[in-house]
Image (spheres, rainbow, N blue to C red):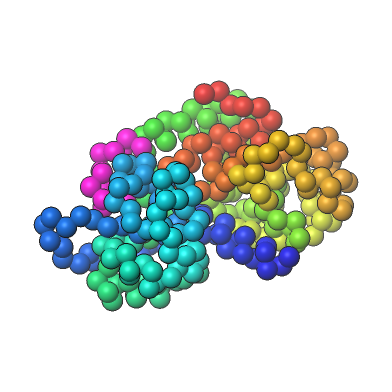
Amino acid sequence: MRSRSVAWLAVLALCVSSLACKGEPRPAAAKEAMRVVSLSPSTTEVLFAVGAGDKLVGRSQQCDHPADARRLPSVGGFADPNVEAVLGLRPSLVVGARGPAGPQLERRLNEHGIATFFPPATSVRAVGELIVALGEKVGRGAAALEVRRQMDDRVAALTGWVATKSPVRVVMVFDHRPIYVAGPVGFVSELLALAGGHNVVQKGGSYPALPIERLLTLDPDVIIDAVTPGDTKPGPSALAKVAGWSELRAVKEGRLRRLRSSTPLRPGPRLAEGLAELVRVVHGREPPR
């Protein structure tokens, strides 16, 4: 189970972390169409959101939204993309999150004259900047500004509603063998705070591991089950059946709540939708539209 946990956390880290990569675009013929390969779900979603989905010629295995993205050729995982597969698609631009592949991927692509764009997306503000910058790179600057405006307006409405509520002590769980949770830093932590959640985990990095005894001591009011986001089958969280979890007050009092999707974990154009989902699980009710 340890390997599964590590693999899942690698996916999460990719969803919510990135570093700026630089690359000068190669000269192109005036009539040559832009060909883009996206290596992260967030950048893929941005491209479709700004109306540039037709420029995509490839994507990572994890790029599953919208449905049209899944019809594109896959070049492997965003943690370990197949560089030969990327080159075979003859892209003029490769975008995504840097992740475990690191700067070596950037260098290899740049050596082949391929421009790269791996913008930071570790905060709400950075996500807005990512949308605008990527929109400009693919000739959809005006559309990108509108996507950001709508996102910012919805976030403002949600945080305004949350401001009328009392903060709720929460913990978000990503796995239970061992127990990995959202730490006090990073994109997910910021969204939790915007949703009116006070993260009881105040030590560690973005995804620290905790023993069940520590979780019992922290005694959160609400436990958010993010172990299988996207599993929309009705029913209670399976965490309630894990040994030791029935002793947690939040479980006893029926405040172990599941995420309906992985949207809150993706720093992209659906950020406001993800925030609304977190508001629901934190406060136990749907926020106003």
When the figure is inspected, residue 62 is found, relative to residue 255, above or below; the finding is below
Q: Position of residue 189 (x, y in %)?
A: 59, 48
Q: How many labels were placed on the picture?
A: 0
Q: Is residue 135 left or right of residue 281?
A: left
Question: Outermost residue, top direction?
Answer: 288
Quarter assignment of residue 194? top right
Q: Residue at x 37, y 41 (%)?
A: 49
Question: Outermost residue, left direction?
Answer: 30
Q: Position of residue 233 (x, y in %)?
A: 68, 39
Q: Residue at x 63, y 32 (%)?
A: 280
Q: Is residue 138 magenta?
A: yes
Q: Residue at x 69, y 30 (%)?
A: 284
Q: Position of residue 248 (x, y in %)?
A: 84, 45
Q: Residue at x 80, y 35 (%)?
A: 254
When the figure is inspected, residue 160 is found, relative to residue 121, above or below; the finding is above
Please name the predominant secondary structure of the magenta segment in the image: helix
Determine if residue 48 is in view.
yes
Q: Is residue 50 left or right of residue 271?
A: left
When the figure is inspected, residue 235 is found, relative to residue 177, above or below; the finding is above
Q: Position of residue 288 (x, y in %)?
A: 55, 23
Q: Which residues are magenta?
A: 134-147
Determine if residue 167 is in view.
no
